[in-house]
Every structure is written in C-alpha cells, then in structure tokens.
Image: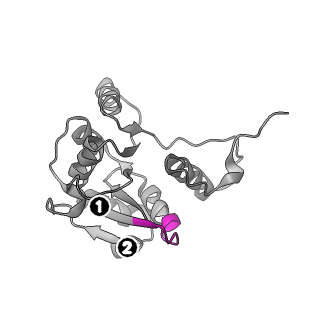
C-alpha cells in the first residue's frame, strides 16, 4: 500500500490538489492523507465548484490543520511522501525555515527529515529575490519545488488538460504513469 500525504494551502490553483485526489481515489493500492489550511479551504470555494466537504471525501483520511498530534506529524508513521498542491509563499517559507506552525508544515518537515519525497507546487508570480531564496532553501533541504508550468508540446486544448499534465508530472515521482500519451515523442 502506497501512502501519500496531500497538503493544500491558500495559493491559487486549488484544482491541482483536487485533481490529484480525484486521480488517486480509484487506485486500490494508494491511500491519501489530506490536510488543508484555512486559506486553502477559502481558495477551494473561491476558485472551484467543489465544496470543502466534496474535496475531503476524495481522501482516505482527513486531518485538521491544528491537529499536531495527527499520525502524519510523526516520522514513525510511514508514508511514501507528500505533495503540497498548491503551495503558497507562506507554506514555502515555513517549509524552507522548518517552521512547524500547523499540521501541513509539520507533515512537510517530517517528510524531509525522513528523507521522503516532498513536492511543492509553488504558485506565485512574478518572483522577487525572497521567493527565489525560499525556493533555493527548500530545494537544499530536500524538497522538489515544482511550479505548475504548462507544457505546450502536448498541444493542450483545455485547462483540464494543462492541469492533468502537471498532476501526471507530479505522480511520475512515484512511477505512476497515468497519462502516457503526454510524453515527449521519441526520435527515430
């Protein structure tokens, strides 16, 4: 059984976390553990037609943001890694500076200290030097900072296709090939 923690913070792009949960839900060998910040909940309702309850139903386990005694806050609770989608500047800063001020950032810190995969879909633009420094700092301690930038060689026709491509790239870190047709074509 693969266990993946999904964190959703308040940056724009709630659909990335939602789509990850939707894609992973039917997989019998994948267990999802979800934590959403208060601003993440606000962003879900502002940006999508989903309710927070609809999103929470997509996960196998849901934790409150203040529950620092939750299983995902302990390194002894084995997971295969964590994805923060979307990742706000505040969350990036907390991860880069090891500030365990809520369950999402604590779970991210645990993921790093246990040398597990941590993918941050950082959603901010334009960037100033402080943002760049935080991304460098997070990367240096083991996180993968992955702004969800679209790939156009797949000739996407919809926003959903752009989102799915990013989600598929994230799941590649766990060798889950959910959209094989999106790969760069082999040359002869």
The quarter of the picture where the C terminus appears is top right
Query: Looking at the image, which residue is at 59% across and 58% down?
Result: 160
Give left or right: position of 50 versus 105: right
Counting from the top left corner in percent of width and height, residue 73 is at 20, 56
Residue lying farthest to the right in this orientation: 188
Mark 1 crowd level (few <14, some 14–19, many ≥20, 10 Å Cα): many
- In this rendering, would 64 be left or right of 154? left
Q: Quadrant of the N terminus?
A: bottom left
Per the rendered image, the range of residues in magenta is: 22-31
Q: Residue at x 29, y 69 (%)?
A: 62
Between tags 1 and 2, which lies in front? 1
Task: Give the left or right position of residue 123, taking residue 106 as reference.
Answer: right
Q: Nearer the viewer, residue 79 or 99?
A: 79
Residue 183 on the magenta span:
no
Residue located farthest toward the top when viewing the structure as drawn: 129
Residue 30 magenta-highlighted? yes
Q: Which quadrant of the structure image shows residue 126?
A: top left
Of the pair 13 and 35, the residue shown nearer to us: 35
Relative depth, front residue between 22 and 40: 22
Q: Which mark is residue 36?
A: 1
The residue at 62%/55% (across/down) is: 161
**Local SS, label 1:** strand
Q: Is residue 23 visible?
A: yes
Q: CA distance from mark 1 to mark 2?
A: 13 Å
Picture layout, residue 123 above or below residue 76: above
- Estimate the x, y position of residue 183 in percent, counting from the top left: 69, 45
Is there any visible trace of residue 122 in the rendered image? no
* Residue 51, image quadrant: bottom left
| Residue 37, percent from left and from top | 25, 58
Query: If you read the primary sequence from the N terminus, does the residue marked by circle 1 or circle 2 appear first?
Result: 1
Quarter of the image holding residue 44? bottom left
Which residue lies under the disc numbered 2?
Answer: 51
């Amino acid at each position: 059984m693969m266990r993946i923690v999904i964190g959703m913070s308040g940056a724009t792009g709630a659909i990335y976390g939602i789509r990850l949960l939707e894609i992973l839900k039917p997989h019998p060998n994948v267990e999802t553990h979800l934590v959403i910040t208060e601003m993440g909940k606000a962003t879900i309702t502002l940006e999508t037609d989903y309710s927070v309850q609809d999103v929470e139903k997509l996960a196998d386990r849901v934790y409150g943001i203040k529950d620092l005694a939750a299983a995902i806050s302990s390194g002894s609770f084995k997971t295969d890694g964590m994805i923060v989608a979307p990742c706000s500047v505040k969350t990036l800063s907390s991860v880069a500076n090891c500030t365990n001020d809520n369950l999402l950032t604590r779970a991210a810190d645990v993921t790093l200290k246990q040398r597990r995969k941590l993918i941050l879909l950082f959603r901010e633009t334009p960037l100033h030097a402080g943002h760049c420094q935080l991304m460098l700092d997070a990367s240096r301690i083991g996180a993968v900072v992955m702004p969800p930038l679209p790939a156009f060689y797949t000739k996407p026709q919809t926003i959903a296709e752009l989102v799915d491509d990013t989600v598929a790239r994230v799941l590649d870190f766990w060798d889950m090939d959910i959209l094989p047709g999106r790969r760069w074509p082999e040359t002869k």
